[in-house]
Amino acid sequence: MKRHLASIFAPILLLATLLLAGCESMPGEVQGRLGPPPETTRSFQADPRIVYDAARAALARMEFRVTGGGPAQGRIEAVSGLSKKDSLQGTRQISISIHIISLSDGGSEVSVELKEIIEEDSTDRPGFATETKLRDTPYYEVFFGGVAQALVTPKKG
């Protein structure tokens, strides 16, 4: 009986040792895929208040609704409209969190974080949604392009 247990546990112990030894060689890969996405940041040569207004204009063109923040706080929180998922029972929405800080050279730094909010079955379980930070999405470039365009386009009014 003891020999039988030893013959079962020896391969399991060896396999566990090999798996754990291999983990040290991969932490960067695992962190890169499972870790937090990098915050996307751009600098603009304009006053933070002007950049704030340009960011609001870019969000309006993207059809995002501002839900929080302000120029004095140097931040904007906004969400896209709701869209139906393929199942017709779930919904999808994008949220954006923007932080604007003043730089010593008179410019501004804008940091953006995008999240996808998915509610799988809004009829059976309303209010239960999952948030996922977005990594590779064109929303970042569309937003920053909109800010740059708003900074060079003269304000009407």
Image: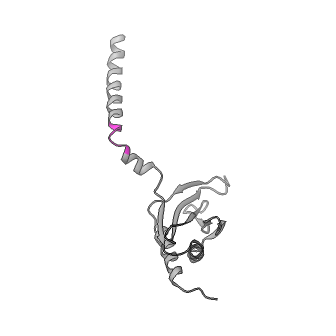
Query: Can you say which quadrant of the picture contains the N terminus?
Result: top left
Q: Residue at x 46, y 71 (%)?
A: 141
Please identify the quarter of the rendering in which residue 129 is found.
Answer: bottom right
Q: Is residue 59 left or right of residue 135?
A: right
Does 13 appear in magenta?
A: no
In this picture, is 94 found above or below 120? below
Give x and y (percent) for residue 52.
Answer: 59, 72
Residue that extends furthest to the top in the rendered view of this protein: 1
Residue placed most toward the observer, 110 or 141: 110
Query: Can you say which quadrant of the picture contains the C terminus?
Result: bottom right
Give x and y (percent) for residue 126.
Answer: 68, 55
Give x and y (percent) for residue 93.
Answer: 59, 63
Residues in magenta, as a range: 22-27
In this picture, is 29 found above or below 147? above
In this picture, is 2 found above or below 108? above
Residue placed most toward the observer, 37 or 17: 37
Give x and y (percent) for residue 96.
Answer: 57, 64
Q: Residue at x 47, y 64 (%)?
A: 41
Please identify the quarter of the rendering in which residue 63 is found.
Answer: bottom right
Q: Residue at x 60, y 73 (%)?
A: 49
In this picture, is 132 found above or below 152? above
Residue that extends furthest to the front in the rendered view of this protein: 104
Q: Residue at x 56, y 60 (%)?
A: 87
How many numbered marks, from 0 up? Answer: 0
